[in-house]
Structure formats: structure tokens, C-alpha cells
Amino acid sequence: MTAVVFAGPSLDRESVPRRPDIEVLPPIQRGDINALIARDRPPTVIGIIDGRFMQSLSISPKEVLKAIDLGIKVFGSSSMGALRAVECAPYGMEGVGKIFDEYLSGRIDADDEVAMVYSDEDFQPISEPLVNMRFAVAAGLSAGAFEECTGESFLRTAKRLYFPERTVARVLRLLTGEVAEAERRRVEEFFAASAPDTKRDDATELMSRVVACLASAGPVTPGEGPAA
């Protein structure tokens, strides 16, 4: 068995196991799964973490279902992978992580909550996905780092911004004068020191699931590595 994982800014590259049977490709776009299926040796596992959607057509559910119909195990998490996993879960795609759970439950329903902009060269994030801000605010409230009304103001302000403009620093600037300065600083300190990166955490969990799936099939045999 071999696996291909599509990932960009959500995946910490240090978390990627160095294995000959796992190939990591850039964020997925339309046609990428068809290209995998057309290989001489298509992968038996596909993981979708990040995807493109403005500069190119996004991967369609129909393309994902085509892979599933061919017996390929498909996992999704974090970003585009979580969105497609919710749509394709009834047909066999497996969603992974907290962000998938939020969309599946309907507690989050806007696609732009996972959207962000990043450098094409090294996948370094330029903006912050709103869904990460939501989990960070929830963690801050659980830790007693700031008041609930302050967290609500933060998320309300972030939601009003177009997704490429969403950064923690910009939201904090907009909150100046709206919340008490001491509270604003508490939020700033929490994000700087303790805020979770839920997209990354979910991507790491997906990689673990992919590795477990490959391990269940036994050791890699010579010549079974990625075909391209």
C-alpha cells in the first residue's frame, strides 16, 4: 500500500514521517485525484488536508467519490479535507479531527472559516483562519484567560473581516476602544503564548491515521513506493 497526502500551511512538515510509502503533495485542486488514479500504481490511501479554491478550481466531491468507488481509502481533515469529508462521509470518506466534527455537527457551516492566504513558496501563513481563532478563544475561556464577552467581541470582529484580512493583530487593533485595554492585552498574551493551532493538530492526527492504515497492511515491499 502507498499513500498520497495533499497538504500546505496546515501541516507541520516536521510531523511528516519519513517513509517511502507516503508522498506529500501541495494543496489539492481539481484534477489531482484523477491524475493519481491514472498512474500506473495509484495510491491505496489519499489524505486531503489543504486545498486550492480561488486561483484554481477546488477538488470536487465527484472526484473524491471516484477514488472511493475504486477502493481507495480517503481521509480528510483541517481545511478543504474537512469540508469534503463532511460531504462525502455518507459514501465512505473518513473525516478526522475537531474541525471536521464542528462542520459535521453543523455548529460551523461557513466555508470561509477554514480559508486563509499563504506563501506559495514555503506555505507560511499570511492570514489566520477563523476556525483556528474559534478554538483559540474557546481554549482561552476554558483557561480563564479573559472574559466571555471579550471572546465574543473578538470573534464577531474577526467574522466581519474578509478572510485574507483576518489576522490576530488586525482583530486586536479593531478591538481598541471596544473592550477594556487590560482585557485586550489578555487576549493578545493568550494568543501569543498558549493558543492552539487546531488546523495543524487535526492534520497531524490525519497523518497518524494514514500511517496506521498503511501499517495494517503490513511492511512495504520492494518497488511498492510512490509511482511518481
Image (tube, grey):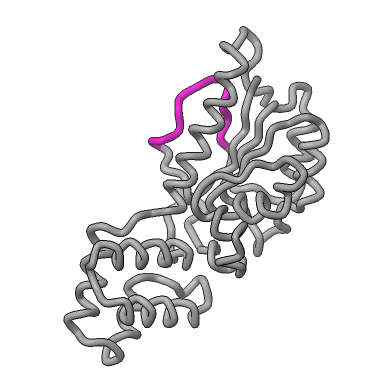
Give the image quarter of residue 35.
Answer: top right
Name the image quarter holding residue 56: bottom right
Nearest the viewer among 166 and 84 is 84
The residue most toward the top is 222
- Front-lying residue, 85 or 34: 85
Could you tell me which residue is drawn at 43 percent across and 58 percent down?
125
Q: Quadrant of residue 132?
A: bottom left
Please provide percent x and percent y for residue 89.
Answer: 70, 47
Q: Residue furthest bottom?
A: 177
* Residue 154 within the segment the image draws in magenta: no
Report whether 65 appears left or right of 26: right
Q: Position of residue 11 (x, y in %)?
A: 46, 44
Residue drawn at x 73%, y 40% is 92
- The quarter of the image holding the N terminus is top right
Q: Is 69 on the left-hand or right-hand side of 179?
A: right
Name which residue lies at 52% across and 53% down. 120
User: Foreground: 56 or 34?
Assistant: 34
Residue 17: x percent and y percent?
45, 28
Quadrant assignment for the C terminus: top right
- Asked if residue 141 is positioned above or below residue 118 in the image, the reply reads below
Q: Is residue 218 above or below residue 159?
A: above
Left/right placement of residue 69 relative to residue 185 reads right
User: x and y percent of residue 81 in the render?
Assistant: 61, 49
Q: How many marks?
A: 0
Q: Which residues are magenta?
A: 14-24
Q: Residue at x 74, y 50 (%)?
A: 30
